[in-house]
Amino acid sequence: MLSNALRGHLAELGIVSAKGRNGTAELLRIIADGRVSPAVCDILEVLARQYDAIGTEIASIDKNIMALHRACEASRRLAEIPGISPISATALVAEIGDWNAFGSGRSLSAWIGLVPKQYSTGGKDRLGRITKQGNRYLRWLLVVGAMAVIRYRAQARNREATMAWPIDGAPTDEVAAVALADKIARMAWAIMVHNERYKEPKLLLAA
């Protein structure tokens, strides 16, 4: 929010930067160098100080999370799964606790809110939207992680590393991300319940 506020105020002065953290850093340098009028600079420096303070707090929190992650064997195993970061891994460990409380990976995924509703018409089962019930924070982390996997797959030169992930055929990346997040949750359950480690799926080669 602070970054967007800085961009908006400076854009009104005709100063536009690139997107992302690098762009924000450039705007902060412009303010620090006094390349805007003193009256405007005094106001923008308030936002800049708040941005720096929050950045310092976030860095401290990230450091603590990484320390917890390195000290937790379960968290380290979960982070081996593509799409699960140390933040996601520590959150899963903290929120779920007893993985055996869920009878299957689908039960865990449903608890998180990633399983689609099912409809039966004419003897056929149809899948609808996900329920969005359950743990919103874990659902958000897994969907964001799944989007990262999809973007990596699109950009990777060697697509074989991610080609085994069953997300082809989805109408949009968002739908694919939810489907992939569901599979990541089920995979996490299997790894934790069976005390295993992640193994990259092997591709089936045509004869």
Image (tube, rainbow, N blue to C red):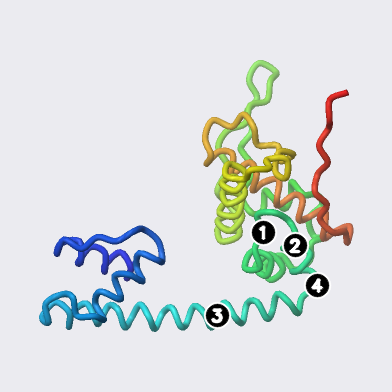
Q: x%, y% of residue 146?
A: 61, 49
Q: Earlier in the sequence, mark 2 or mark 1?
A: 2
The three-letter code of the residue at mark 4 reads Glu
Q: CA distance from mark 2 to mark 3?
A: 20 Å
Inter-mark Cα distance, 4 to 3: 20 Å
Q: Position of residue 138 (x, y in %)?
A: 61, 59
For the residues labelled 2 and 1, the Cα–Cα distance comes to 7 Å
Look at the numbered discs 4 and 3 and tell me whether their residues touch, using CB distance below 8 Å. Answer: no
Report the residue marked by disc 2. 78
> As shown in the figure, which amino acid type bears the numbered disc 1?
Ile
Asked whether the beta carbons under mark 1 and mark 3 sit within 8 Å of each other, the answer is no
- Residue 18 vs residue 64: left or right? left
Q: Which mark is residue 73?
A: 4
Residue at horizontal 76 percent and vertical 55 percent from the top: 188
Total tally of numbered discs in the picture: 4
Give the Cα distance between marks 1 and 4. Answer: 15 Å
Labels 2 and 3: the sequence-earlier one? 3
Residue 80, given in percent of the width and then of the height, sits at: 75, 60
Q: Say the numbered circle drawn on residue 84.
A: 1
Secondary structure under tag 3 reads: helix
Residues packed near mark 3 inside 10 Å, few (<14), some (14 to 19) or many (20 plus): few
Tag 2 near tag 4, CB within 8 Å: no
**Which amino acid type corresponds to the residue marked 2 in the rendered image?**
Leu
Q: Is residue 176 above or below residue 39?
A: above
Badge 2 local density, few (<14 within 10 Å), some, or many (20+)?
A: many
Q: Are marks 2 and 1 in contact (CB under 8 Å)?
A: yes
- SS type, badge 2: helix
Q: Does residue 67 appear left or right of residue 171 in this picture?
A: right
**Of marks 2 and 4, which one's residue comes earlier in the chain?**
4
Q: Which residue is mark 3?
A: 61
Residue at image x 30%, y 76%?
A: 29
Q: What is the quadrant of the C terminus in the image?
A: top right
